[in-house]
Amino acid sequence: MKYLLTESVRHLKLPSIKVERKTFPDGELYIRIKEDVKDKPLTIISNLTPTNFLELLFCVDAAKRAGAILKRLIIPYLSYARQDKLYCPGEAVSGEVVCSVLNLLNLPVVVFDIHNPAILKSSHLRNVSLLPHLVKSLPKANYLVASPDAGGKSRAAEIAKILKAPLIVMKKSKSSGKIKVKLMDKVKGKDILLVDDMISTGGTIIQATKVLKLNGAKTVFCIITHGLLVGKAKQQLKKSGINRVIVSNTLPVKEALSITVVSIGSSIKKLNLNK
Ligand code: R5P
């Protein structure tokens, strides 16, 4: 089975329908499907990066016009999702804008571990978690599952349920751009499993690890779906004392000393996406 892929998911190395892409001298993008997809079932896979929304929309349009039977659009990583509500007056709720536009495609859309699944309600978009898949790559231990902030509690709770493990929730705050993570529970001698949707600057996980280790945690492992790893995140992680971060490759992440990358390419087919 071949997929229609945008450039953002080339790293998944899935079999792909041939697409011609070019940029006109004025910067406009041109998309043309170069294979016969008429009356054939087709799944489109594309991340939604901060800059590729038009490429994604053009691919959907080209597939519809070429007569493909569009089964679904899979968006492994959907950017802008963190702006899920109005935090300050005058803001745009970017996450909602993006989801509303995707909803207009009138097509089943699957996203993986969106920051706040509540943003998807009353839409054609469905959230699937890759975290239970990542758990399989952890070394065996009696983990104490930890969410680094209150917002991630239900995500971590699902993993605690799978592992039949206890759950703690840490408290995250930000002041002048600096992340602080507070611990309210005893962790001495425990193997901790931090669970989060994404790692961007690494600030959240690094601060959580530091406080856990300072309070006597034996080991700190972490499962995270989206590895943005911007700036010096990788180097800082290495210094943080974290034992291992297990991350999926919704985004192109390279393995490193403390980072294990779990491929979702082959498991995309196996995931139960037909619900
Ligand atoms: C925020 O609430 C998210 O769930 C992540 O914890 C956060 O976006 C991670 O970002 P960073 O790695 O920059 O701390």
Image (cartoon, grey):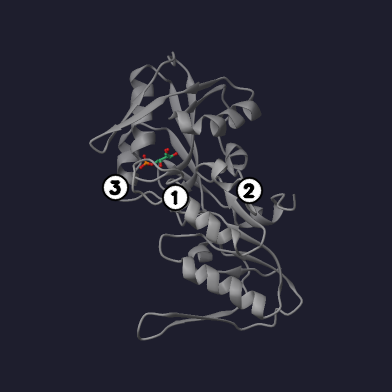
Residue type for callout 2: Ser
Quarter of the image for residue 118 reads top right
Residue that badge 2 annotates:
122
Residue visible at 41% across and 64% down? Answer: 51
Question: Where is ligand 1, by quadrant?
Answer: top left
Q: Quick one: SS at disc 1?
A: loop
Where residue 257 appears, x then y in whole percent?
40, 43
Residue type for callout 1: Glu
Q: Is mark 2 within 8 Å of ligand 1?
A: no
Residue visible at 44% across and 25% down? Answer: 219
| Residues at marks 3 and 1 touching, judged by CB atoms closer than 8 Å | no
Residue that badge 1 annotates:
255
Crowding at dot 2, Cα within 10 Å, few <14 / some 14-19 / many 20+, comes out as few
Residue type for callout 3: Lys
Residue situated in front as seen by the camera: 155 or 209? 155
Where residue 23 appears, x then y in whole percent?
42, 82
Crowding at dot 1, Cα within 10 Å, few <14 / some 14-19 / many 20+, comes out as few
Q: Quick one: SS at disc 2?
A: loop
Q: Is residue 147 above or below residue 123?
A: above
Q: Which mark is residue 229?
A: none
Dot in front, 3 or 1: 3
Q: Earlier in the sequence, mark 2 or mark 3?
A: 2
- Spot the residue most to the front: 89
